[in-house]
Image (cartoon, rainbow, N blue to C red):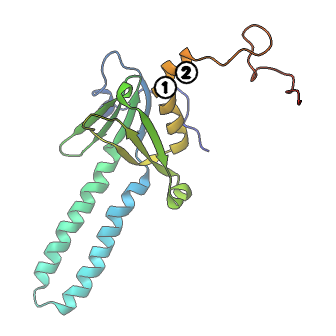
Amino acid sequence: MRLVSPVEIEPPTSVNRYLLPQERSVITVRMHPAALAGPLILAGGGLLAARKLTNRSARPDVVWGAYLLVSLYSLYRVAAWPVTYLAVTSERMVLIRGLISRTAAAMPLDKVTGLTLRRTVLGRLLGHGTLIADCPGRRQAFRKLRYVPYPEQLYLEISGLLWREEMDETALPAYGGEGMTAYDSAEPFQQE
């Protein structure tokens, strides 16, 4: 598994302006480049379809006009990718996206009751996954985060933030001496 560098780096300015003063940025990542596959396949498939339909159609200007709209949509999606970020702070998850009109959707971490990581075969090969956050009883700003890079590491980091209070309250039972747990013991377990 590739690890995200633990070095403290300031989030980009386009992300930093959406963070509250008391928040500490924990993770800031751009979506995986595999998110660009759909728009690029759409543009390439549209070009092939436009070339085929031009030979069969009496109105090639309509065909190429439709392809222009498809290619502009694909170009917009490709241009919006570099400014789409997932920022996880000490208090919430923020998805920032949009090229012309900017959208910052936030989900408070204390309202999230579950986190699921889904990885398809293609996602495992390319190194991305989908994070699904459960937040019952609320209209969710976002539920599925697709094309998340470093999915296992982000899942563990976000899970650690979600349940940090529960982990602090419930300590492992003592084993041996004071403050020593079964995981700290240098002696192997005795088999009975």
Front residue of 64 and 111:
111
**Amino acid residing under circle 1:** Trp
**Amino acid residing under circle 2:** Met
Q: Is residue 174 above or below residue 78?
A: above
Question: In which quadrant is the C terminus drawn?
Answer: top right
Circles 2 and 1: CB distance less than 8 Å? yes
- Residue 59: where, in percent of width, then height? 10, 86
- Real-space Cα separation, disc 2 to disc 1, in angstroms: 6 Å
Front residue of 17 and 169:
169
Circle 2: is it few (<14), some (14-19), or many (20+) Cα within 10 Å?
A: few
Q: Is residue 29 above or below residue 42?
A: above
Query: Which residue shows up at 16% across the image and 79% down it?
Result: 63
In the drawing, does residue 40 fall left or right of residue 131? left
The secondary structure type at the circle numbered 1 is loop
Front residue of 166 and 92:
166
Circle 1: is it few (<14), some (14-19), or many (20+) Cα within 10 Å?
A: some
- Residue 92: where, in percent of width, then height? 36, 27
Q: Is residue 129 above or below residue 18?
A: below
Q: Which mark is residue 167?
A: 2
Query: Which residue shows up at 62% across the image and 17% down it?
Result: 171
The secondary structure type at the circle numbered 2 is helix
Q: Which mark is residue 34?
A: none
Query: Which residue shows up at 30% across the image and 41% down it?
Result: 142
Q: Which residue is mark 1?
A: 163
Dividing the picture into quadrants, the one containing residue 125 is bottom right
Dividing the picture into quadrants, the one containing residue 190 is top right
- Residue 163: where, in percent of width, then height? 49, 25
Query: Which residue shows up at 58% across the image and 17% down it?
Result: 170
In the drawing, does residue 69 fall left or right of residue 143? left
